[in-house]
Image (cartoon, rainbow, N blue to C red):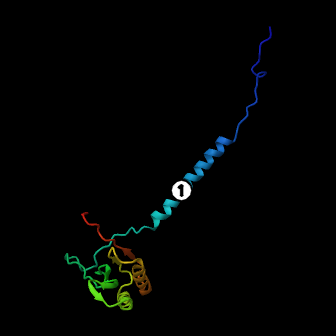
Amino acid sequence: MRRVSLLDRRQEFDTTMTPMIDVVFLLLIFFVWTASFQIVEQSLPGSIALPPAGKGDGEPPAVTPQDDFDPIVVRIGLDHGRATWSLQAKQIEDAAALRRRLAEIARIRRAAPVIIHPDSEVPLGYVVDAYDAVRSAGFDTIQFATPQEPGRS
């Protein structure tokens, strides 16, 4: 009786490359994704501001007018079909005067935030005029306030 050899029953192994390509692709995606986070982390400021030498007596540093600047509020109302303008709660005659006043403020601090606050009945054209005045003065940070609905707190 003949003994069956294991060598005779040899089968050819067929290896597919698809699972290996999938793993390599997933690793590539993982490393690219985590490398992009590393760039953002390195650009974050990491230093702690220390008090200037000689000022360790607990006295707060002097605040310059540029540091202590409130947001600029432009209010737009409607009075008998005519737009009324106010800047920091001071009445302004017209849109041209608003542009001049905003340009004066922009020379002091261009980075100050500007809030445009129209009343609910003001047509959109007046709001766009105010926006154009703020942009032409050179301000970059412009926000819009909406009127509060009655009955909401």
Asked if residue 118 is positioned above or below residue 149 in the image, the reply reads below
Percent x, y of residue 28: 59, 52
Please give left or right for residue 39 compared with residue 147 in the image: right
Query: Mark 1 falls on what kind of element?
Result: helix
Q: Residue at x 39, y 91 (%)?
A: 96
From the viewer's side, name the closer residue of 119 and 66. 119
Which image quarter holds the C terminus? Answer: bottom left
Percent x, y of residue 148: 29, 68
Q: Which residue is drawn at 35% across and 80% down?
A: 112
Q: Mark 1 points at which residue?
A: 33
Asked if residue 93 is positioned above or below residue 141 in the image, the reply reads below
Name the quadrant containing residue 52: bottom left
Asked if residue 7 is positioned above or below residue 31 in the image, the reply reads above
**Crowd rating for badge 1 (residues with CA inside 10 Å; few <14, some 14–19, many 20+):** few
From the viewer's side, name the closer residue of 66 and 30. 66
Q: What residue type is labelled 1?
A: Trp
From the viewer's side, name the closer residue of 9 and 135. 135
Name the quadrant containing residue 12: top right
Q: Tell me if I can see residue 74 in this picture.
A: no
Please give left or right for residue 33 compared with residue 61 in the image: right
Percent x, y of residue 48: 33, 70
Farthest top residue in view:
1
Number of callouts in the render? 1
Which image quarter holds the N terminus? Answer: top right
Percent x, y of residue 20: 65, 43
Name the quadrant containing residue 15: top right
Q: Tell me if I can see residue 106 in this picture.
A: yes
